[in-house]
Amino acid sequence: QQPVQSPQAVILREGEDAVINCSSSKALYSVHWYRQKHGEAPVFLMILLKGGEQKGHEKISASFNEKKQQSSLYLTASQLSYSGTYFCGTSWKETSGSRLTFGEGTQLTVNP
Amino acid sequence: GAGVSQSPRYKVAKRGQDVALRCDPISGHVSLFWYQQALGQGPEFLTYFQNEAQLDKSGLPSDRFFAERPEGSVSTLKIQRTQQEDSAVYLCASSSYRGPRGNQPQHFGDGTRLSIL
């Protein structure tokens, strides 16, 4: 039931774009995206709820395809600060505070 | 500070010892979660509190793991008779509660890195 993230790792040059996917075999209610740097807390990026909405935050945006049970995170014009491991966390209950099941992560490295 | 605070940051214990990990959530956050994160893996759910009530403890790996939140604020995760496989980072997260519709972000602490020798 763990969501599957792809790719496992990606290396970019500063200014390039990247897409990270998160797929579930079970019907999703919400997808949470986090970025974690080594030895630090996961930092919340955004939540997407079922309904196929797309959200954006500066140069980072995400979509939720309910038909495919998949969410994608888009990073445009990447910056050095974007480096880290990106996790999607999924929930299947329509209640606030429900447990999240996380993927194994996508390690993103942005080089100058 | 306004964030989730966890202590200690690092804990080394000998196999068989008991340990207690503390989490101080964001003030006013009703929901509190504990996760376990192995090296190179995503966080794995352990247990969930809403105020002082432990609503879900299905992720606790064995009866050696026990969590409490007696006054609905600070929480403690206790591991008895520690084993080497308990070595991991233990993350605490809190979130506000806005009713049954929608989900709220979970805000994580820096975690406690537990090493069992």
Image (cartoon, rainbow, N blue to C red):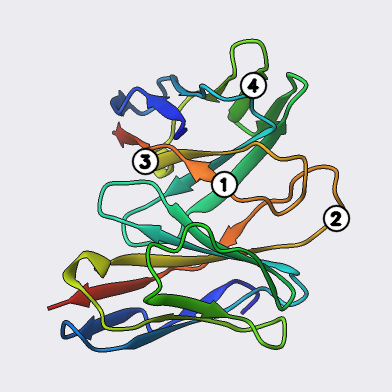
Label 2, label 1: how far apart the Cα atoms are: 17 Å
Q: Residue furthest left?
A: B117
- On the same chain, marks 4 and 3? The answer is yes
Question: Residue A63, labelled with which disc?
Answer: 4
Task: Read off the chain for label 2.
Answer: B
| Upstream in sequence: badge 4 or badge 1 | 4
Residue type, label 2: Arg
Residue type, label 4: Ser
Q: Is residue B2 left or right of residue B111?
A: right
Q: Is residue B66 left or right of residue A7?
A: right
Q: Residue beneath label 2, please?
A: B98
Question: Residue A87, labelled with which disc?
Answer: none
Label 4, label 3: how far apart the Cα atoms are: 21 Å
Q: Is residue B73 above or below residue A55?
A: below
Which quadrant, please, contains the C terminus of chain B?
A: bottom left
Q: Is residue B101 left or right of residue B96?
A: right
Label 3, label 2: how far apart the Cα atoms are: 32 Å
Q: Is residue B63 above or below residue A88?
A: below
Q: Residue at x 47, y 77 (%)?
A: B66
Task: Read off the chain for label 3.
Answer: A
x, y percent for residue A96? 76, 50
Q: Residue beneath label 1, please?
A: A100
